[in-house]
Amino acid sequence: MLDFLAENNLCGQAILRIVSCGNAIIAEVLRLSEFIPAVFRLKDRADQQRYGDIIFDFSYFKGPELWESKLEAKPELQDLDEEFRENNIEIVTRFYLAFQSVHKYIVDLNRYLDDLNEGVYIQQTLETVLLNEDGKQLLCEALYLYGVMLLVIDQKIEGEVRERMLVSYYRYSAARSSADSNMDDICKLLRSTGYSSQPGAKRPPNYPESYFRRVPINETFISMVIGRLRSDDIYNQVSAYPLPEHRSTALANQAAMLYVILYFEPSILHTHQAKMREIVDKYFPDNWVISIYMGITVNLADAWEPYKAAKTALNNTLDQSNVREQASRSASVSEKVHGQVQQFLKEGYLREEVLLDNIPRLLNCLRDCNVAIRWLMLHTADSACDPNNKRLRQIKDQILADSRYNPKTLFQLLLDTAQFEFILKEMFKQMLSEKQSKWEHYKKEGSERMTELADVFSGVKPLTRVEKNENLQAWFREISKQILSLNYDDSTAAGRKTVQLIQALEEVQEFHQLESNLQVCQFLADTRKFLHQMIRTINIKEEVLITMQIVGDLSFAWQLIDSFTSIMQESIRVNPSMVTKLRATFLKLASALDLPLLRINQANSPDLLSVSQYYSGELVSYVRKVLQIIPESMFTSLLKIIKLQTHDITEVPTRLDKDKLRDYAQLGPRYEVAKLTHAISIFTEGILMMKTTLMGIIKVDPKQLLEDGVRKELVKRVAFALHRGLIFNPRAKPSELMPKLKELGATMDGFHRSFEYIQDYVSIYGLKIWQEEVSRIINYNVEQECNNFLRTKIQDWQSMYQSTHIPIPKFAPVDESITFIGRLCREILRITDPKMTCYIDQLNTWYDMKTHQEVTSSRLFSEIQNTLGTFGLNGLDRLLCFITVKELQNFLSMFQKIILRDRAVQDTLKTLMNAVSPLKSLVANSSKVYLSAITKTQKIWTAYLDAIMKVGQMQILRQQIANELNSSCRFDSRHLAAALDNLNKALLADIEAHYRDPSLPYPKEDNTLLYEITAYLEAAGIHNPLNKIYITTKRLPYFPIVNFLFLIAQLPKLQYNKNLGMVCRKPADPVDWPPLVVGLLTLLKQFHSRYTEQFLALIGQFIRSTMEQCTSQKMPEMPADAVGALLFLEDYVRYTKLPRKVAEAHVPNFIFDEFRTVL
């Protein structure tokens, strides 16, 4: 009959594909469970208030129209809903596909069973498949995996979260309307069960059997599978565990399958006492905590509590005397075998001969070790004992007492066993690979010895006093031939023949009295020894390795091992070379990957890579977590070194008196530094002793591990220092900004110096790591802060700055800012607020309007540069851009509201437009015309002024940042600054040339050159923020005239001061001139240049008309408003770096030249 798993056996391949798929689905569910967006949990108040109206559970399906109409009634909810969709559709779709594949899995399994019953597979029925060894295994696995899938989903993704995700997918996805969509069935299968994985949560009634019954499965199939699992050893594991007391361990995998599958037929658990007794006696006579899949543990005493038959049957096992007996037996066995293992591990004990002679003994020792470790780890695990359940607590306390449980001893046993297993496997692999060559070598040696002896008895060879004996000569030649004729491939016959040859050689020595001749005896003894070695060598079988693999399975501890992390870390801290021993434990843990990957591999499934990557990644993350203690300890020593270097050790001057030499030597502190440095290098050595290791499919390089660990610790500490160092009290007078920056600068400098100091002892590139990680922290925080201003947020898993191995920690926000960079930015904006301060452009300084004290100056930006580096300033600049965009968008919506929707304002503007056109002419009775327009629109200017000044303030800050970046770039990297400057000018020249003559080249659409060079130019401060276009705009009616009116409405609040320019008249009505000018200029820059033209023309007309009226009324003074308008034009030209012609087009140049002399 055809092999069941052969590629051309359709029946076998179909069920193999289903099982392979099942393992892949579980891995995907486990992977996704770490990426559940927090909003779907609606845990905190803020999320409930914000998203409560757009995230629904299945109650939505009772009346979707009602819910949707509620949404449509509120535009802001619609907007939020759309934003939520954009941000979450990708991850929700991924979850939906996982849920869909669970449903598809059970549909496929049911279809396969129907096909078997209907005879689609020729000569195959359910019965024949269950008779075949592979078929039996696969059918049991298929049902078991479905159960595991449902349990894992319920444990890892809460019912409410699943419902909210499915409803969100239903609402947001276009696929729901397609005919083949089985959304309803998926919702029925995965609706909430009421189960909660929180400790102390009550179990829902009829759980999980009612959950398992949601999709009906053929009952005959279920009962046949249970029958097989009850009676057979379907994986032939008992052969690997010959001792009867190890039987429950041998059948542990099968027991886990049976546990899950019994929920598909709960009547057995409830009423079939005989069956349950049989199951408990066979599988659970000495254990009641089991691992069902990749370390998910279950305590049967708790799980079977609601089922009468199961509970009664298990009571024998949970009887106090039995619990005591099992606990004390495990304790005594573990003590005994631990001594043996330590004996075996002594240097030089495990040699090849010892190994070959003692294979059964060594294997028995391994079995005992692994069985004891398994029993103790599972039955003392915290995860398997609900602390609120009194009975479970009593059983656990009894075990802890009777087994004299000590986690450190158990961990030591696990370490030594893993090391012992690792050495045995390596030696065995080595011997297997050399088996044939050694065998041939011994055969050749033995045969040659016999030929030489034959030559000796021929009398030709001059061996002392050996007479010629033709019979013996012929006999030895024959033996030599016989040895040569031994065939390696037929090991059984060769073994028998070898034994006969050894006997013959012993007999010949006795019968022919050859003992008298020592040399002949020696030859015979050597040959016998070689023949013995041949027998030993032929006995090296691969089965031994397979048995070791089965016995050494540690998949039950995939999650439990975490409880030993602190012990591992403590032992590494005390003795860093411990890492080499841990390597064996990690490799032993890696063997757990065989369980989910076996079927995927057999099916040649494309999922092999992603599933291996997931489990290998989990394992490597765990290894990193354990070994992170090394960088942590290094940094602890480092902090002491920093303290000693900065506070205790004084610099040695270039010249000093010799009697002061002792004082400067400071032997005590220097010895401390040397001792700490030595400790750091010992830690480094410890991790580097671990060889490059393959964990699953991921190669773990210890040097890389060390570097990543150091980076992780650095990121943790620097991020914490930045978070804690930049928290401000907004009520503090004066601001805490400068002192906090100075303090933080000292902290960062300490980190930097110590990092530089340590790099040679740890053999890493300190400066490179420092720059990469600090820039990553700052860029990530800027990105998170800017998320506030984005519709489509950048999630952590999408961020190019966040990493799984070296994560940047997130801290809870202290105010409206999310991160430290937001707090820094808002504090700067608060202290330079144009309503409170006055900015003097020539001094680059802000003064308090009331007290006239200096508030801050451009020194602030050099301080930020010192503390946060270029990345910090650059990040601050990016954040200011986002805030500016937000302000400008708010301005546009405000313009719509207060001007375009206000009839009265529009009428005033129309009247004014008629009065001032054409713009080239003078306005008759100008003061009256302008004054009446200002008075009628008075109420709108307060909000307008706020918006304009905010934008102006941020633009001034951006200019200051650009200046600081540019000057530091020119100092610190002249060549980069010069190269960027030249490249920029060359590019602009080329682009201008292209616009003059389109046949000349220009960067194409897909060319990223302009985009990339902008990032460099901004980082080097080679840009002018005032020329930036922040938002796209449409045409706005009345825009130039509104801005003109706004400006002349503000002029009376200002007065001209010879030294300071335009300053505020009354601090009670604050207006700051530079932000006003820069804000207006930025605003106009966002629109078509013809608006700016009209605006300037209106100002020119205002100046000319006012001057005209002034001369006709023979006023000697120049009106203050005209002076203000002229100063505005002058500043406008200066800030935009435009030629003066622009202003002279609207105001005669003699007025420009003269007006300052009149003042």
Image (cartoon, grey):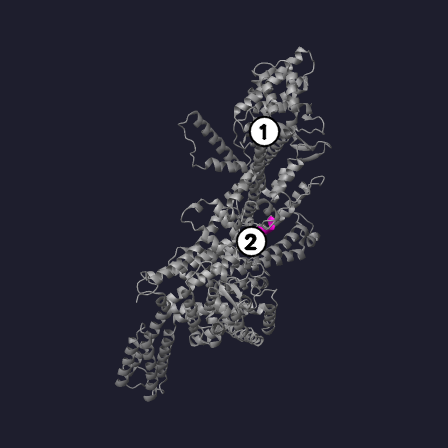
What secondary structure prevails in the magenta region?
A: helix
Q: Please tell me which residue is depicted at 67% across the width and 28% down the height of the picture.
A: 1071
- Residue 569: image location, x then y, percent: 57, 61
- Residue 1049: image location, x then y, percent: 65, 23
Where residue 351 sits, quadrant-wise, is bottom left
Res. 466 mark: none
The residue under label 1 is: 895
Q: Earlier in the sequence, mark 2 or mark 1?
A: 2
- Residue 728: image location, x then y, percent: 67, 43
In the image: residue 530, left or right of residue 369: left
Q: Work out whether 435 lies above or below 682.
A: below
- Give the residue at the far right of this rendering: 851
In the image: residue 472, left or right of residue 1075: left
Residue 593 painted magenta: no
Q: Does dot 2 land on a helix, a strand or a loop?
A: helix
Res. 710 mark: 2
Where residue 783 sits, quadrant-wise, is top right
First to last magenta residue range: 708-719
Quarter of the image containing the N terminus? bottom left
Q: Nearer the viewer, residue 159 or 733?
A: 159
